[in-house]
Image: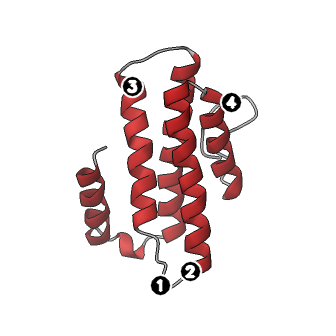
Amino acid sequence: MKLNQAKKFYKKSQNDGLENANPFEIFKKINYELVRALRIVSQKIEKKEIDEVRQKNFSKALTIIYTIQTNLNFDKELKISSDLFTFYEYCRKKLIEGITSLKSKDIFKSAVSLDKMFNFNYIQNDGVLDVI
């Protein structure tokens, strides 16, 4: 997903009646997509596969992180926004380090951390990614 597409989706979601939707459910869905993309990149690195799927999910994860970071409301919730920005920055750095140094475990750890931080339970014990 390109940045412009993400911005269009975000603006469209505001106009499509999602203002009545539960913001946490939207946030949960976005984070599910982030965890999923991080996991795919991690698996591709582990298998030493450099392909379009890995690149697409790498870009998708970075776009999601960037979109979340740029939409945090520092004026309204400084502490929470700062903490979230720092956490997503950690995920972004681990993703980039993982790609450049082929450390799949660091990327997967950031996905697990994201999952645990919000208690979403996307990643089950068997490693299957699913919403519980």
Left or right: 45 in relation to 21 = right
Is residue 13 shown above or below 34?
below
* Mark toward the viewer: 2 or 3: 2
In this figure, which residue is indicated by the disc labeled 1? 75
Disc 3 residue type (three-letter): Val
In this figure, which residue is indicated by the disc labeled 2? 78
Q: Residue at x 54, y 63 (%)?
A: 85
Check disc 1 and report its element: helix, strand or loop: loop
Query: Would residue 114 be visible to someone looking at this image?
Result: yes
3 or 4: tag closer to the N-terminus: 3
Label 1, residues with CA under 10 Å away: few <14, some 14-19, many ≥20: few
Contact (Cβ within 8 Å) of mark 2 with mark 3: no
* Mark toward the viewer: 1 or 4: 1
Query: Where in the figure is residue 2, as x and y percent of width and height?
Result: 28, 46
Disc 1 residue type (three-letter): Asp
Label 2, residues with CA under 10 Å away: few <14, some 14-19, many ≥20: few
In this figure, which residue is indicated by the disc labeled 4? 127
In this figure, which residue is indicated by the disc labeled 3? 53
Contact (Cβ within 8 Å) of mark 1 with mark 2: yes
Spatial CA span between label 1 and label 2: 6 Å
1 or 4: tag closer to the N-terminus: 1
Q: Nearer the viewer, residue 13 or 118?
A: 118
Check disc 3 and report its element: helix, strand or loop: helix
* Mark toward the viewer: 1 or 3: 1
Disc 4 residue type (three-letter): Gly
2 or 4: tag closer to the N-terminus: 2
Disc 2 residue type (three-letter): Leu
The single residue placed furthest to the right in the displayed view is 125
Left or right: 53 in relation to 7 = right
Q: Residue at x 37, y 39 (%)?
A: 59
The single residue placed furthest to the bottom in the displayed view is 76
